[in-house]
Image: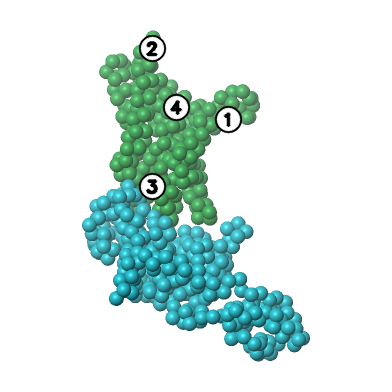
Amino acid sequence: MIEVNGVSKMFGAFPAISDISFRVEPGEILGFLGPNGAGKSTTMKIITGFMPPTDGNVTIAGYDIVTDSLEARKHIGYLPETVPLYTDMTIKDYLEYMGRLRGMSRDYINQRISEVIDICNLGDYYSTIISKLSKGFRQRVGIAQAILHEPDVLVLDEPTIGIDPIQVVETRQLIKNLGGEHTVIVSTHILPEVSQICERVIIIHEGQIIAEDTPENLAQRLVGSERVDLDVKGPQQDVLVALGQVEGVREAVRLEGQPGSVPRYRVQSELGIEIRAELASTVINSGWGLLRLDGVIMSLEEIFLRLTTEDELIQQVDPTQEDASAE
Amino acid sequence: MNTFTVAWKEIKGYFSTPAAYIVGAMFLSLTGIFFVFDVTSPFAEASVRGIVNWASFFIVFLAPLLTMRLLAEEQKLGTLELLMTAPVRDWEVVLGKYIASLIMFSATIILTLYYVLLLYVFGQPDTGPVLSSYLGLMLHGAAALAVGLLGSSLSANQIVAAVVGIAVLLMLSFVDRVGSLVSGVAADVLNGLSLNAHVTDFTRGVIDTANVVYFLSITAVFLFLTIRSMETRRWR
């Protein structure tokens, strides 16, 4: 349903995201997880066609988001990070306007408005001016707007940011219920959120995808490992075996690279063991050329840690969670 | 279709918020004051020339104040992102907003017909120049609104948007003054660009195709620039 192929985005000379590729299958809920500034919003903006990518392409339901933009956009419901609301309109007028912009007929709009008002629990505020609504309600209006036209693809950028804990729980449940009918991408920097609502997670850091798996597998893989990348000139099989035998190495794999370039290997090791010196001497003693060696800038743990600690604040003040633990 | 959806929303916006009423009222009171000065001066003539000249001058401020909200607010509220990811073309948005501002402007101008009515009650104005003056006023307004809309596309801040619009319009209005200081081709070009130079003929009862084409061109060019400006928003 969503295909992202080698997408990069440069802001001037600064790469916001580089070479991102992934697919989302129909009905799937994909979590897009990363610390603040990792490139989540940029990716969302490219997927929804707000910004063209510098490189690569995105297709939504088979339509390219740049060359077939209008067709592709018809299939998308989007909730940007800052909820886009006309604050001087009532919820009803706002939803009506959004429906008309998406080419819905009057009857269909009216039918859908009453449905989404129900889904998002906005019944009592139907004709309230949006500027008078609290942040949580505004968020719900934003979601109502995104699902109004029953889009195949739903892109939600940080849907639970800045709302109170009870509303966070409600919003997460709401999103979970939307899966199945819609293909959903949710971006967030809160780890427990993805494990609650997503079937699959992509972790993005400094503009690159560093992991992609189910939340359960990811949590397992994350337990104690550190990574080193090496470019080694030498017979591939032998290099792999030799690297795998270095003490403390858990796994050594060859990374897909440009054809013709020097092969790159990624070595996963146990946490807290310095293996770089050992790796280097293994390569050199075997008579191969070591062209590059670097510890991956930030291990998954560190990112994981960052993500978890940020949510602890929410967990602490989340009354529903407290109740659960009190029992 | 989308153009009219956008236009209709903005027209409702104009009539349901006080800002446009205040701007319109300011315009009407200022033109009213100068109308009184005009008709009470010695040897006053029963013509709309004076009032239309003043209205033309105040359009420089009226138009950007009417358009400043249209695109700047979308950027400020973040709704631009919504609009540009909805299946709507950029030009449909720009044109819809422009039409709304044109209707609001026309509504304001229609109210000035009250002065004309007074002229007919108390004198015998020449109908030809009255009609041509109002045609000129509408064309001038149409061009000024396009300039104002460009200003609004350039900033998320309404004040900045209005100031940019007013500044550009002031320059366009008075370049003929600079034109009178130089000679030759430069003078022709500067006079050719001037809004004021093209208004004068209309108030004399002359409808020159060149003037009509001039205002329509200014409108088209600035609307085109506005659409382009919106497109480049995507890259920022």
Callout 3, which amino acid? Answer: Gly
| Mark 4, other Cα within 10 Å: few <14 / some 14–19 / many ≥20 | some
Residue at the top extreme of this rendering: B42
Q: Residues within 10 Å of mark 3 (few under 14, many from 20)?
A: many
Chain of the residue that carries numbered disc 4 in the rendered image: B
- Residue kind at label 2, given as amino acid type: Ser
Work out whether residue A89 or residue B8 is closer to the camera in this orientation and state it.
Answer: A89
Q: Distance from label 2 to label 4 (Cα)?
A: 20 Å
**Chain B takes which shade in the image?**
green
Mark 3 on the same chain as mark 2: yes
Q: How many marks?
A: 4
- Residue at 53%, 54% in the rendered image: B236
Q: In the rendered structure, which disc, 2 or 4, sits on the residue that comes first in sequence?
A: 2
Q: Numbered disc 2: what chain?
A: B
Which residue is identified by label 4?
B57
Residue B44 x/y as whole percent: 37, 12
Q: Amino acid at mark 1?
A: Leu
Mark 1 or mark 3, which is nearer the start of the sequence?
A: 3
Residue B35 higher or lower than B144, as above or below? above
Q: Colour of chain A?
A: cyan
Relative side of B4 to A36, left or right: left
Callout 2 secondary element:
loop
Is disc 3 placed on a helix, strand or loop? helix
Q: Which callout, 2 or 1, points at the residue further toward the start of the chain?
A: 2
Nearest the eye: A45 or B7 = A45
